[in-house]
Image: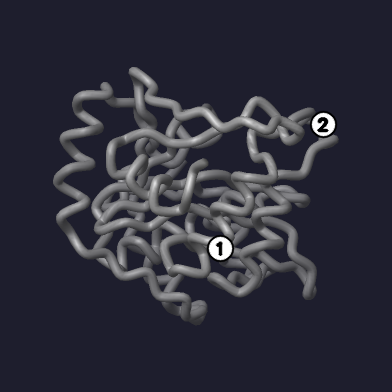
Amino acid sequence: MITPQILLDAYRAGIFPMAEGSASDEIFFVDPEQRGVMPIRTFHTPRKVKKIIKKQIFDVTYDTTFKAVLDGCAATGKKNRLNTWINLEIKQLYLALFKQGACHSVEVWLEGDLVGGLYGVSLGGVFFGESMFSTISGASKVALVYLVAKLQMGGFTLLDIQFNTEHLTQFGALEITREEYRRRLEAALKKRGEFSSYSEDFDWISRFLQSNTHTS
């Protein structure tokens, strides 16, 4: 049986859990040869995403409705998600980690409705991004920007995204070897990142966007 402590030890060792599908009773651990990481200090916010944020259409919070974000990430039946790797046991494990303060969520709201978000595990100076979702265009991208801003403020040095995608490459994501990832992981675990659940005001995120000098 996998316990929350075993799960945290797995992250420290550089591996992460998945299930074959939502109905699966088994969990397996993954250790990819190429690992996706998102630079925190040199994170790039695309111009289109900056415009969305500056319009202040969305409200963004942290750790206010973790289970709803988890359920959103596990939802199936959408155009591009016919199945999910998040089964019942995985849900229970992350809910337990959230109660322990080792898991966090970013929530994106539109007129009081949850329309996007993401969640992940926090250890030392590492944030292990697990999954994100959106029910409206741009919501998950906004969640990612707000996550990185929070990590940068909290002194995190490594954002693990597991696998790189075209969607994430536009923000500066890259792939590194397993060996390089473990080297960075070891160093980052010795740091002490602070993830504040406080919902910052717009001036805070505006200053972060101004620090992103590149455009696209």
**Snapshot quadrant of residue 62:** bottom right
Q: Is residue 60 left or right of residue 28?
A: right
Residue 160, position as x, y percentages in the image? 37, 42
In the rendered structure, which amino acid carries the disc numbered 2? Lys
User: Going by the picture, which residue comes out furthest to the front?
Assistant: 1
Q: Is residue 181 left or right of residue 204?
A: left
The residue shown at (17%, 43%) is 186
129 above or below 26? below
Secondary structure found at label 1: strand
Q: Nearer the viewer, residue 208 or 62?
A: 62
25 above or below 2? above
Q: How packed is label 2: few (under 14 Cα within 10 Å), some, or many (20 or more)?
A: few
The residue shown at (24%, 53%) is 157
199 above or below 190? below
Q: Return the residue at label 2.
A: 79
In the rendered structure, which amino acid carries the disc numbered 1? Val
Disc 1 to disc 2, how far (Cα)?
Answer: 23 Å
Residue 187, position as x, y percentages in the image? 14, 46
Residue 33, position as x, y percentages in the image? 34, 18
Q: Nearer the viewer, residue 17 or 146?
A: 17
Q: Return the residue at label 1.
A: 106
